[in-house]
Amino acid sequence: MKRKVFSVLVANTAGVLNRVAALFSRRGYNIDSLTVGETENPAYSRMTIVCTGDDEILEQIEKQISKLVDVIEITELTDYDSVCRELILVKVGVSGEQRQQVIAVADVFRAKIVDVSAESLMVELTGNQSKLDAFIELLQGYKIEQLVRTGITGLLRGKVN
């Protein structure tokens, strides 16, 4: 199974997200990650869709997405020609001694402590998936109370055509 990341420029209209999601649902394809946001031009939104499948399925997904009326452009984001990032927020339950240990781990990963309470720390970290996975792995010795990931978002490198 391969994984592909598609950057899809769409018209910023009501129901466009539903039409894209319905395409996956009708065909029985799974979306591993989906992020959507308005672009520099409010008339357009950019979707970053991550999906997994064999070559034939991934090719079908790309063709079917490109046929949708609201789709302006679809681009595959590969490791060598794009920058992809993800954001996580992690709330870690900590005691007095553990607090400094979690802060030290966060510092190594250049993460930010965004909230502090008597019983917990909330950490924000942005990076590629392997960096985030490594960070979460190091926190396994502590009590992870809550964790949320945004999903991948990305852009092509270099000059826009």
Image (tube, rainbow, N blue to C red):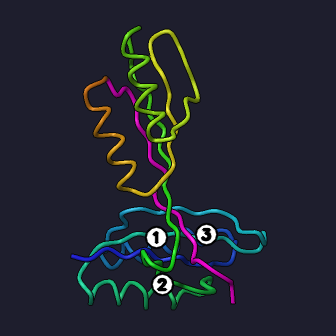
Asked which secondary structure carries label 1, the reply is strand
Q: Quadrant of residue 155?
A: bottom right
Separation (CA) of disc 3 from disc 2: 15 Å
Pointer 3 residue: 15
Residue 94 quadrant: top left
Mark 1 residue type: Ile
81 vs 63: above or below: above
Query: Closer to the N terminus: mark 3 or mark 2?
Result: 3
Neighbor class of circle 3 (other Cα within 10 Å; few <14, some 14-19, many 20+) is few
The CA distance from mark 2 to mark 1 is 10 Å
Q: Residue 125: where, in percent of width, then height?
A: 50, 43
Residue 115 percent across, percent down from the top left:
57, 24
Q: Residues within 10 Å of mark 1 (few under 14, many from 20)?
A: many
Q: Position of residue 58 (x, y in %)?
A: 33, 84
Q: Is residue 157 magenta?
A: yes
Nearest the viewer among 138 and 115 is 138
Horizontal placement of 31 versus 158: left or right?
A: left
Disc nearest the viewer among 3 and 2: 2
Q: Amino acid at mark 3?
A: Gly
Give the labeled residue for mark 2. 65
The residues colored magenta run: 143-161
Is residue 62 found left or right of 126 in the rendered image? left
The residue beneath circle 1 is: 49
Q: Could you tell me which residue is drawn at 78 percent across and 72 percent down?
A: 41
Identify the amino acid type marked 2.
Answer: Ile
Nearest to viewer (mark 2 / mark 1):
1
Q: Residue at x 63, y 80 (%)?
A: 158
Residue 35 among magenta residues: no
The reply to whether callout 2 and callout 1 are in contact (CB within 8 Å) is: yes
Determine the secondary structure under disc 3. Answer: loop
